[in-house]
Image: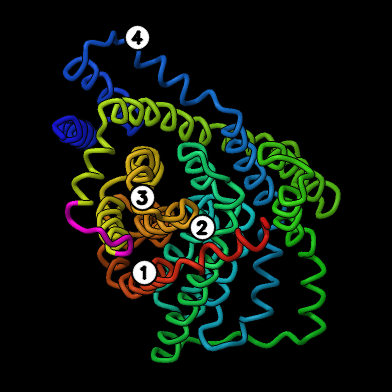
Amino acid sequence: MDTLFIFLGVFFLLLALGLPVALSLGSTMMVLVVTKSSLPLMIVPQQMIIGADNFTLIAIPFFMLSAELMGGGGIAQRLIDFVSSVVGWIRGGLALVNVGTNMVLAGLSGSSVADAALTSSFFIPVMTKRGYAPDFSAAITAAASVMGIIIPPSIPMILLGLIASQSVLSLFLGGVVPGVLIGLALMGVSYSVARRRGYPAESWVGIREVWRRFRTTIWATLYPVLIIGGILGGVFTLTEASVVAVVYALLVGTFVYRELTLKVIYRSMVSASLTASLVMFIAATASGVAWFLNSERVPQMIANFLTGLTESPMMFMVIVNIFLLVVGCVMDLTPALLILGPILYPVSQRYGIDPIYFGVVMVTNLAIGLVTPPVGNCLYIATGVAKLPLTDVIREVWRFLFALIAILFLVTLFPPLITWLPTALRT
């Protein structure tokens, strides 16, 4: 276990010194190779290249690019208008529209950070102007954005499927029900707060206007059907689906909505490339660290320790959930997933736990870390857009955190909420 303690100590020390996550992981692996083995240092770049050399990973930059193109091609604005016409007339309607928009955008982007950036810039100023407290507006926007990596397609699910050798499509399908439950829970909390504080309702636009707005968004709502349906039907693979997503976004944004220009396309490609390169760098270094920890039998040691504590699979899941909630507060989602996935997955198999169920619970848990300080990226994005002190937003976000954690333990205690859809659609 001393290998694990050295890894954690060096890694968090380098993070505390301000080194980027990917460089911290790579440097930590070099320290482990020098101190805990007789292997040459050349093994570090070798394992990094092996970790990144996977055809499935190509899907990540393409899904990111498709999300950028949809944001710049007018699709996001039309989705907001449609969701507003459906639920905006309820008390606290803009908060409900915020959550509903994030639910729909989750099926387009696969990234919570991307959703947080988009919805924060739109909803926080509009909600504040309509009489909502700025800290409440920022809190609900940050909390709702976590659905971006739970409802398919999800970039963390792609990474997890790769490192755990599980079907990415099954992980996608397993995230549908938890994602929808999170959306409904956040809507319930928002409505309760809105009634108590007297937040306004928007005007009812009429059924004809709802239908008109739906028709303008039909191309956007067909996107997840095309992607998931195409993979399920065997028309294309996951990687091919990501390319189809880009082509679809280009065609819709250019020829249907006519808002995609060469300048927007160029800006989208640059943004997607920068984000994807960062994810790939982290994936490469994390794969190297995971390989070394596995070679030192760290997962087996942890499994022996945990099985000595409890033989109950459900109690193991409770322990893992508590552990991951703490990890999510101090480590970003992607490195946490890539480092802990190869360690915890073998342990879960010792308990006979369904791998798809375990993977979805793990992603859902770490997604909550996106709105918990000190690492919560989505929380910081919303706070920055609102131009508020972090402490003000934290005072509002706690009620949404309780809702997120409640749904997490609900799907943990009732595994069929995750497994029934993958089982039904894959059989």
Q: Is residue 105 above or below residue 97?
A: above
What type is the residue that disc 3 sits on? Ser
Which picture quadrant has residue 3?
Answer: top left
The residue type indicated by label 2 comes to Ile
252 in the magenta segment: no
Q: Secondary structure at mark 4?
A: loop
The residue that disc 4 covers is 42
**Number of marks:** 4
Q: Which residues are magenta?
A: 308-314
The answer to whether the residue labelled 4 contacts the one labelled 2, judged by CB atoms less than 8 Å apart, is no
Closer to the N terminus: mark 1 or mark 3?
A: 3
Q: Could you say where residue 279 lies in the image, as x and y percent from the top left?
A: 47, 35
Q: Closer to us: mark 2 or mark 3?
A: 3
Please identify the residue farthest to the right as the structure is shown: 255
Pointer 2 residue = 150
* Residue under label 3: 348
Looking at the image, residue 64 sits to the left or right of residue 247; the answer is left
Label 3–label 4 contact, CB within 8 A: no
Residue 286: image quadrant is top left
Residue shown at 51% from the left, 54% from the top: 149
> Which quadrant of the rendered structure holds the C terminus?
bottom right
Circle 4 packing at 10 Å, graded few (<14), some (14-19), many (20+), is few
The amino acid pointed to by label 1 is Phe
Q: Which residue lies at the image location 76% right of the left edge and 45% below the top edge?
A: 234
Residue at image mark 1: 409
What separation in Å lies between label 4 and label 1 (alpha carbons)?
43 Å
Seen from the viewer's position, the closer of residues 220 and 254 is: 220
Residues marked 1 and 2 touching at CB (< 8 Å): no
Q: Is residue 73 left or right of residue 103?
A: right
